[in-house]
Image: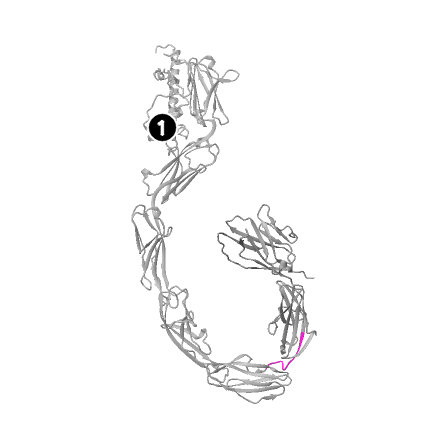
Amino acid sequence: MLSLNLRITFVVIVVCRMYAGADGSVTISSSEVTVPEGLSLTLTCNYTGIDKLYVIRWTNNGKDSGHKYDITIEQSEPCTIFGKPGLDKTLFTYTCFTLTILNVTRDNQNDNLTCQANLNFNSGNSVIVSVSVPIKEVIMTDPTESTVTMNEGTSETFKCKTSGGLPQATIKWFKVTDNTCSQSGLEITSSVSSPFVTDVDDLKQVESILTFTAIGSDNGLRICCTASNVEGVKRVSGTKILDVRYAPSDPPVIEGYASGGTYNMIENSIENLTCSSSGGNPLANLTWSCFNNQMSSPIEQGRTVKRVVQWTARRNENARCTCTASHAVRPNKHQTAFVNVNILYSPSTPLFKLDNTAVGSSIRIVSDTIQTVECDSSGNPYPTTSDFTWIKGTNVVGTGPVLNWPGGVMVGDDGSYTCTVETTLTPSDQSKDVKIATNSSTLEVTVLYPPKLQTFTRESALEGYSFMIQCVYSVGNPARTKSTITRLFNGTSWSGDSHTMHSINRADAGLHRCTVENTMDPTGADTQTGTDTADFEINVWYQTSISRFEFSAFSNQTIITVNESERLMLVCEVLSNPNSTIRLKENHMATVLKEATNALKVEYLIQNATCSDTSVYTCTAFNNYTDMERAPSKELQLFVRCSPRPSNHHSQLRRNFTGFLHGNVTFVSMVFAYPPPEFKWKMWNGTYYKEVNEDNYAIFSSYLLTSLTILDIKEDNFVSYAVQVSNGIQPDLQEIFHLKHQVITTTSEDGGSNQASVSGGVIGGCLCIILAVVVIVLLLKRKYDCSIKMSKKKDIQTENDFQESDNLGFNAAVTYEIMPVEKESTDYDALNAGNDRPEKSHIYMSLDESTSTRNPPCENSKSEDPVYKNTKRKNSMQKNL
């Protein structure tokens, strides 16, 4: 059994109403357009308004009282049906805004549903339910015989009837060649009655009647019908075969010409045609219909009959000459053969057209348009493409009825154009002569074209100076021209063909456009504006400024502290036209890290930051227009956190020292570390290293350097010493120093030994060394502080560690007598070696450099007595002085 395909159709009726004192609207929509019978249909009530929604009411204005109902849904959580305790919930379900009919049946046909919000906002539309039930079959009820016998030209009644369905079915009739009814056959649309519809069980039964009239060619064909009331579902009937009796199977023949062909004759000539018919029982009766014809008597030859006609025709009297064969079996149904008589005559005087509109003998055309001009001439034969020739002067410029200009009409294409049409009159009767016929006309063409701007180049100007823009052009046709200059990026326009900027600035740079216009009035078209535009760039030179200088991960910071091994990208960007030379330097322009020319941006990568990368970084940039004395420059201060580690300079590698009783010796340790470390000096007591606390020790510590001086060496001082360095970043550093005995004997002027003097001289020399080291370190510290201040981004306050009490006894060291003994080279000598020191001069700097500063805030600072930070001394004066 075929399954039922059910369809539901919604008709939306929009109703507009106005409500006083209310502001809102309600619409209703459905979930489906087509719903099979037995399935559900969901409707949605959509409310738009400012009033609070507290109730939705659904109303079915059904086709009869049995289908009318109201369902009110209270808009509370959860939404409930209000006032319908007896509602059959097997028929409906709902939400706050939807109502679902659970089982759509044919009883729902034409139900009209609306919704209402707050009992005063009615929906502006409704949903009308239309249920569709597919038909099950279509049957041909008449005639009952499988074969229908009829004479050609007679009629027979055929009837087809469907089973019930909704909506009513549409029945179609077909002639087919086999016993299967298919729409690929020939549909029969004539002689079909209006459908007869009967209601059965609320369904529509449809009956269609075809009154069919047979012709000879219908013999052997079949009649059938199809029916459908649901898209995609079609039912077919059985077929009835046709047995048609007819006269001769072949129509009459006009000898020498195919039926429906053309017979050509030149106007006013006399012509003859012969018609014959074969077959049929009895023979056909032949007659001619042809102008003012004269027919001969019929001539029978065996099973063929012939008849001749003669006539004279005039121009514009083209008609058919028809031979008709009638037969007794079908007295009202004749067979014919005919030829179309074609009267040949010369072409008419050509007319000119634009877009199928006559334009006379002159036209105006806009240049560069794809324009065509048609040369129109009538005649018989109608002139073909090869019959037309266009001539300008003595040159052939085109063939065919249409003149065009490939690529568009150009300036210089104006002038006089002559169109000549030539046809050949060739009669069908080859015994008659062929005639050549010609005609021509002349057209004047005027070409309209816009003004033309000259080519512009890129213009450059210096910021702050006067600059004039000028549009140079040649006039068009017509010559009257309007000029405009426009700045493209903001649309500012100036009328005229020139404009002067009295003080150009960089904001004026960019694309500008010259526009020139004229008004053109082409034939057969609207007035056009002829326009030419040319864009040109104004390039404004200006000096360099630094727009961005930072480490990319620390935007807008000028003092940066990072951990060791971090990856840093130093970026310097400039505003500049032309592009600039950009230099990245380290330590106040001492070292060039990277330099780029013709650039707007430079990047420098520190892949793994180390202690040695702690420095002041500078970006300087300039271009051709930069005042070099005021070249822009910016600075950044970078600090790299790292644990203490020994200096790798050769002067810091000494760990073994010698001394003698009552002499002096100094151990010095210099490290790399940030933050600045703390130092603790210890001595070996035979079991472990303990912090030094005897009176004859002097400890000096400042930033990255520390020293331990043993004054008045005693016997128990000849042991190992350790300095422990820590700054809160692991691991701490511990350096070991060893002091061993050394005996030094010196001779005085009188030849005797002078041990005490030697000791005093050694002491004095050691103190001088200590003073030199302290001075160097303090100057380095001062230089380092000045470097930080030069960043101009953050004030760094230097601690005041000057303690006068710590300076006792050391000023006198410069008066010590230096005995003529050989002086050992010390680890501090490298600090004065300008060409042999570590690269980080901001940390390690020679004395000469430290006293020759480049920074104005520090140049005039007064040199003071050295101050010993973190210096520890137990006895205030040396005993042997």
Query: Foreground residue, 330 or 376?
Result: 330
Query: Foreground residue, 598 or 248?
Result: 248
Residue flagged by tag 1: what amino acid is it?
A: Glu
State which quadrant residue 39 falls in. Answer: bottom right
Q: Residue at x 47, y 78 (%)?
A: 381
State which quadrant residue 210 falls in. Answer: bottom right
Q: Position of residue 705 (x, y in %)?
A: 43, 24
In the rendered view, tell whether residue 455 sits above or below residue 523. Answer: above
Give the secondary structure at mark 1. helix
Answer with left or right where residue 420 lies relative to residue 332: left
Answer with left or right where residue 354 lies relative to residue 108: left
Mark 1 residue crowding within 10 angstroms, few (<14) / some (14–19) / many (20+): some
In the rendered view, tell whether residue 395 sits above or below residue 37. Answer: below
Q: Which residues are magenta?
A: 241-251
Camera sees residue 655: no
* Residue underneath mark 1: 849
Answer with left or right where residue 101 lies relative to residue 807: right
Q: Residue at x 35, y 47 (%)?
A: 507
Residue 248 on the magenta span: yes
Camera sees residue 144: yes
- Picture quarter with the N terminus: bottom right
Query: Foreground residue, 286 or 174?
Result: 174
Q: Position of residue 86 (x, y in %)?
A: 65, 51
Q: Position of residue 858 (x, y in %)?
A: 34, 28
